Image (cartoon, grey):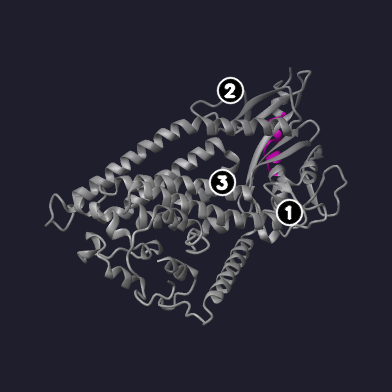
Amino acid sequence: MRDDPEGGTMDGERGEEPMDERTSDGERPLPVTPGQAYDPAAPESDAGPALESDAGPHPEVEEVPSWRLITTLAVAGALAGLLIVGVFEWAQPQILAHRAEVMRTAIQEVLGAPDRVQTLYVVDGELSEQPPAGVDTTTAERVFLGYGAGGEPVGYAVTGEKAGFQDIISLIFGYDPAADEVLGMRVLESKETPGLGDKIYKDSSFVAEFVRVGAPIQGVKDGGDAPDEVDMITGATISSETVIEIINTRVRQLEPMLEGYMARGGGSP
Amino acid sequence: MSPRQTTPSEDFLRGIWKENPVLIQLLGLCPALAVTNTVANAIAMAAATFFVLMGSSILISLVKNLIPNEVRISAYILVIATFVTLVDLILAAKFPVQHKDLGAFIALIVVNCMILGRQEAFASKKPVGRAILDAGGTAIGFTIALLMMGTFREVLGSGSVLGYPIFGEGFEPWVVMILPPGGFFTLGFILLGLSWWEDRKERGERPQVREWPHGVGSMTGRGQTGGRRVA
């Protein structure tokens, strides 16, 4: 079959066949797709009825009026839009709930499972319990203050992001402004290289380096024994450095705010 | 080549092996190369593609007489894009982990030429039943190809299958296999192996050296000859 002498080219094969009206009127050949060439049954089997119903009402008319083309696409587009909106309405609450759940778990993790977490909003360079008016509470800049079992504040969970090796790395870390210590770190989103850069969240020993490390953090390559040193990942220097930079930058930005809030009596039981 | 009717079983089986979309027709290579670094990702991509291909084939086969010829490609793309958006939303709602891993490649199913090819070549000409068989066969063939690549790459690149380690502690993963080059290596070796096997088989049947590729000009490759073989 492979050496079939006829129909040396795909076009040749197609030319021999009656196909349907679309091609036989010579207006425009169908594009050759791999599936088409070896589909000899098409003309006989079912294109027949299709052809008749196509040509039935007005056999002489060669061109379909453009209003029909536009109407077809408009109707199809409207139906598709309706369908998508319907499914979106169903899916969106679940997507948001999932995101909130991821965030909640992450906060628990970086603050060492606090008893209670309070959301604070950044308003005019200060922390406030009330979100600024007219802002979406899920996208406004915020930090999360965790309280221990005795009602004492244990630290803030702060998010941050920066371009890593491949794409934006987004993470959350716990921070205790009184002790100037990072309590823990968890990567929320990253597309770092599988097998190398993704160790910033897959390598548990790297993640563990961020538990109770002094800020600002120093990234080192020789083991990192000092209280403010983190041992970076071999083969993923840029990703490791980005994680450390994100934390240091955010600590620098938010430190006065976090301490100010505590000084004003916020965060105390 | 005498035109003849294909049987339903031919419609179904064709896509699985003889005209496997990835391994023979070399279509849909973008997802096949990009998201086969783990078996789980390969399964998720195959499932998403299955849904889109099946849905589009059924719908287009149903409405084929309503679509004017001039706008048929636009209509196919519209239908395919709608199904892809649905898959995207459903995955995000129900399987957020896989959705995150597959990332942009879900949206790129829209331009998977394997799907558009089946609409143009088959679903737009055939009754619904046949379109379902054809879409099912093609999607299964796509799944087989993705699973082959996903298993190969995960075993060598991570030393695991579906996340379960299969080698001992001493195994050093070949990180390159889960990076993009590993996709090309894997596909290349699989195609090489298949070609060699086909070649052996044909030589056994016919001792003389066959002309190959023939009649397709300078366009070499399995895609052309593989498709013709069945005709």
- For label 1, the residue is B159
Q: Give the amino acid type for the residue marked by disc 1 in the picture.
A: Gly
Q: Is residue A116 left or right of residue B199?
A: right
Q: Position of residue A178 (x, y in %)?
A: 79, 30
Q: Position of residue A222 (x, y in %)?
A: 85, 54
Q: Quadrant of residue A18?
A: bottom left
Residue in the image at 61% along x and 57% along y: B149
Q: Is residue A143 left or right of residue B195?
A: right
Of badges 3 and 2, nearer the viewer stands 3
- For label 3, the residue is B44
Q: Give the amino acid type for the residue marked by disc 3 in the picture.
A: Ala
Mark 3 and mark 1, same subunit? Answer: yes
Disc 2 on helix, strand or loop?
Answer: loop
Disc 3 on helix, strand or loop?
Answer: helix
Q: Position of residue A99 (x, y in %)?
A: 58, 34
Q: Position of residue A68 (x, y in %)?
A: 20, 48
Q: Label 1: chain? A: B
Q: Which residue is more in the foreground, B68 or B199?
A: B199
- For label 2, the residue is A130
Q: Give the amino acid type for the residue marked by disc 2 in the picture.
A: Gln
Local crowd size for mark 2, using a 10 Å CA cut-off: few (<14), some (14–19), many (≥20): few
Q: Which residue is more in the foreground, B23 or A182?
A: B23
Disc 1 on helix, strand or loop?
Answer: loop
Q: Report the Cα–Cα distance between label 3 and label 2.
A: 42 Å
Quadrant that contains the C terminus of chain A: top right
